[in-house]
Amino acid sequence: MANTKTSARTLPITVIDSGNTVAEEAHADHHDHASEGPRSLGRPAPCMVFVGETGIDEAQIAREMQHHRALKPEQSRAAAARALVVRELLRLEIERLGLADDVQPAQGEPLEEARIRVLLEREVADRAPSADDCRHYFEANPERFRAPDRVRVRHILLAASPADSEGRFKARSQGEQLIAELKEQPHLFADFAMRHSACPSKDAGGELGWLERGQTTPEFDRQIFRLREGLAGFPVESRWGYHVVSVDALATGEALAYDEVRERISDYLELQVRQQELQHYLQMLRERHGVRGLED
């Protein structure tokens, strides 16, 4: 039987709503003007937000979203759109005031940031809080001005990777067993630490010393500050495994004197005033130049 060979046909498939072939449409998508943004089916990305006559398209917002992480995509998109609107408002105002050519950036400072810095230094007033403002804030918020709580802790780390479910089960079971033995013979804690702990503190009997909030792994930190003094009745879990924990002492932070925190209060209030002044300024720019589509 003679072999026959059928040549394949090339079908001119076209994109819906376009008379061009797929190849032609793809070629048309590679344009040289970055300002047009990426295309969808050969069209520029749509603009939903406008500052004055300048459109902020969805491609710009999508790129900006990487800098505004949020639990929900719509929250990230809204934050990205607001940031781009603020940037454009400031750009337009720099242009209106003729500041663009008069700015000298500091070493390593991007030109755009330098222009914004000069604009805000000129237009947004710095107001330092008065001594009375600081004193009033101190007296109205006494709970905020205390020395940090501290806890003195010993532990035995029974290591297990978060991905090792079997290993973590064994570590927890071992922790429960050690706790049961330590309830009967608490003087063996240092010995158990030396024999079982995967932490370098085992050479000091598991001693971690005095800890303040934020000095250890977050999940471990949260739990040890909820414990009462003495041997914890359960293994404390962290990303490193399970910990047999003994709280040897608790120290509640004492109230701080006004003179110890006056400078901190002044810095905080100055920042708050600065933020308020900046918000008022941005609202004024919004009314001057016009913003459409941001609420949507």
Image (tube, helix red, strand yellow):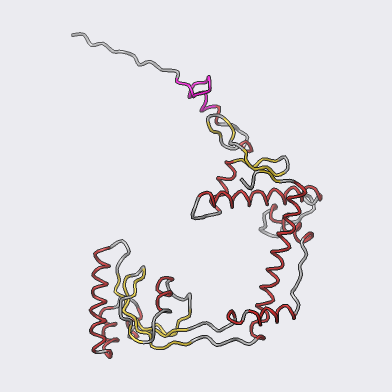
Location of residue 58 (image quadrant): top right
Q: How many marks?
A: 0
Residue 109, x across and y down, in percent: 67, 57
Does the magenta stretch mainly form a helix, a strand or a loop? loop
Relative to 190, is 70 above or below?
above
The answer to whether residue 26 is magenta is yes
Residue 296, x across and y down, in percent: 61, 45
From this viewpoint, which residue is outermost toward the left? 1
Query: In the picture provided, is 223 more to the left or to the right than 38?
Result: left
Q: Please provide the residue range marked out in magenta.
A: 13-27
Relative to 138, is 75 above or below?
above
The answer to whether residue 265 is magenta is no
Query: In the picture provided, is 225 more to the left or to the right than 57?
Result: left
Relative to 9, is 125 above or below?
below
Q: Residue at x 31, y 65 (%)?
A: 161
Query: In the picture provided, is 173 more to the left or to the right than 291?
Result: left
Viewer-side residue, 43 vs 9: 43
Q: Residue at x 45, y 81 (%)?
A: 211
Q: Residue at x 25, y 80 (%)?
A: 178
Q: Residue at x 72, y 60 (%)?
A: 278
- The quarter in which the N terminus is drawn is top left
From this viewpoint, which residue is outermost toward the right? 97
Residue 16, x across and y down, in percent: 49, 24
Residue 256, x across and y down, in percent: 60, 86
